C-alpha cells in the first residue's frame, strides 16, 4: 500500500491528468490513475488494486471540475489546429511531426490523436478551419450581394486578401504548390474543397457581369486564370521571399489588390 507521502505525489499526478485532459498510459491505469469515479467517492491506492473508500484520502469532487474541464476540452481542438497551422506554414507538411504539434499545444501525442487520428486528417482539419470557411463565406456573400458586378469583383478580391492573403493561413497555398506533387491525396483534397469552389465563385461573378451587360463577351475560364495568377504570385512572394523582387520597392498589399482589380474591371467593362 502507498505511504502517505507517496500518496500526495499520486494525488497530484491524478489531478494533472484531469486538468490537462491527458490519456493515461496502461501503466498509469494499472496504478489506479484513471477516470470514471463518482464525484462523491474518495479513493486510496493499494498496489495494482483500486479501493474506493469514504475517507479523506482524496475527494474526487475537488479534482473533477466539470465546468473547467469542459471549457478546456471545448478549446482543445482549436488549440491543436492553431499549433498545427503554425508548424505547417513554418516547416511544411513533410517536416512537421505530430509530436511537435502536440508539444506546441501543450498536450500528449495520444491526446492529439484522440481528436485527429493522423497527420493527414490534422492537415485537412487545418485547411477546413482556415481556408474552406473563407471560401464558403465568400460564396454566401456573392449570392447575397446587391451591388453591381464591377463592385462585386472589387469587393471579392479585396476581401480575399483581408480574410486569407493577409493571414498566416495563406502559407498553406505555398505548401500545396511546393509539396503537392509529393502528397497527391492532399493535393486532390485541396483541389476539391478549395480551388474548385473558389474558381466557381469567380466564374459566377464574371457570368453575372456578362448577363447584366456590364462586361463584354470574353472567355471566362481564361479570365479566371488572369485574375488568380498575380494574386497567387503575391502570396508566394510573401511566404517565399521571392528573389525576383529583390531591390524592388515594397508594394502595400492593399494597393496591389486594388490596382489589380481595377485593371481587370476596366478590361472587362463594355
Image: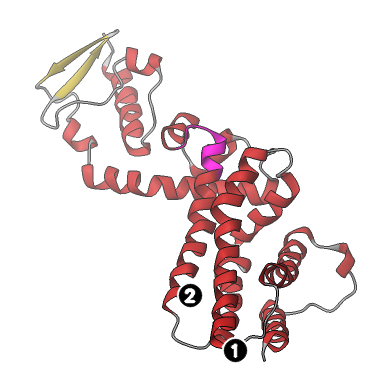
Quadrant assignment, res 227: bottom right
Q: Residue at x 56, y 64 (%)?
A: 200
169 or 107, nearer to the observer: 169
Q: Main secondary structure of the magenta part?
A: helix
Q: Residue at x 39, y 15 (%)?
A: 26
Quadrant assignment, res 157: bottom right
Does 119 lie within the magenta span? yes
170 or 26, nearer to the observer: 170
Badge 1 marks a residue whose secondary structure is loop
Choose mark 1 or mark 2, whichever is in front. Answer: 1
Classify residue 134 as left or right of residue 222.
left
Circle 1 crowding by C-alpha within 10 Å: few under 14, some 14–19, many from 20: some
For marks 1 and 2 on the same chain, the one whose residue lies earlier in the sequence: 2
Vertical arrangement, residue 148 with respect to residue 31, above or below? below
Does 149 lie within the magenta span? no
Q: Position of residue 2 (x, y in %)?
A: 28, 12
Vertical arrangement, residue 193 with respect to residue 12, above or below? below
Residue span colored magenta: 116-123
Badge 2 marks a residue whose secondary structure is helix
Q: Residue at x 18, y 21 (%)?
A: 43
Circle 2 crowding by C-alpha within 10 Å: few under 14, some 14–19, many from 20: some
> Contact, CB < 8 Å: mark 1 with mark 2?
no
Q: Residue at x 40, y 45 (%)?
A: 76
Quadrant assignment, res 214: bottom right
Classify residue 2 as left or right of residue 240.
left
Q: Position of residue 27 (x, y in %)?
A: 39, 14
Residue under label 2, please give it. 142
Work out how far the residue at label 1 is from the one at label 2, CA to CA, in angstroms: 16 Å
Give the numbered dot on residue 214: 1
Amino acid at each position: 500500500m502507498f505511504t502517505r507521502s507517496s500518496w500526495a505525489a499520486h494525488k497530484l499526478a491524478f489531478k494533472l491528468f484531469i486538468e490537462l485532459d491527458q490519456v493515461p498510459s496502461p501503466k498509469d491505469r494499472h496504478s489506479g490513475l484513471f477516470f470514471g469515479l463518482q464525484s462523491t467517492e474518495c479513493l486510496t491506492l493499494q498496489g495494482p488494486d483500486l479501493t474506493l473508500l469514504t475517507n479523506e484520502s482524496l475527494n474526487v469532487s475537488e479534482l473533477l471540475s466539470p465546468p473547467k474541464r469542459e471549457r478546456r476540452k471545448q478549446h482543445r481542438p482549436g488549440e491543436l489546429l492553431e499549433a498545427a497551422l503554425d508548424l505547417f506554414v513554418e516547416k511544411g507538411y513533410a517536416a512537421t511531426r505530430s509530436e511537435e504539434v502536440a508539444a506546441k499545444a501543450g498536450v500528449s501525442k495520444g491526446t492529439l490523436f484522440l481528436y485527429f487520428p493522423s497527420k493527414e486528417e490534422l492537415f485537412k482539419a487545418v485547411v477546413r478551419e482556415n481556408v474552406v470557411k473563407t471560401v464558403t463565406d465568400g460564396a454566401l456573400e456573392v449570392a447575397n450581394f446587391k451591388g453591381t458586378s464591377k463592385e462585386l469583383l472589387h469587393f471579392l478580391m479585396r476581401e480575399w486578401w483581408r480574410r486569407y492573403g493577409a493571414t498566416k493561413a495563406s502559407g498553406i497555398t505555398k505548401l500545396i504548390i511546393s509539396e503537392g506533387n509529393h502528397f497527391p491525396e492532399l493535393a486532390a483534397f485541396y483541389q476539391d474543397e478549395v480551388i474548385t469552389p473558389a474558381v466557381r465563385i469567380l466564374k459566377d461573378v464574371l457570368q453575372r457581369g456578362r448577363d447584366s451587360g456590364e462586361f463584354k463577351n470574353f472567355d471566362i475560364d481564361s479570365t479566371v486564370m488572369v485574375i488568380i495568377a498575380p494574386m497567387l504570385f503575391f502570396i508566394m512572394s510573401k511566404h517565399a521571399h521571392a528573389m525576383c523582387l529583390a531591390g524592388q520597392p515594397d508594394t502595400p498589399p492593399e494597393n496591389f489588390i486594388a490596382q489589380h482589380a481595377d485593371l481587370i474591371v476596366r478590361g472587362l467593362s463594355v
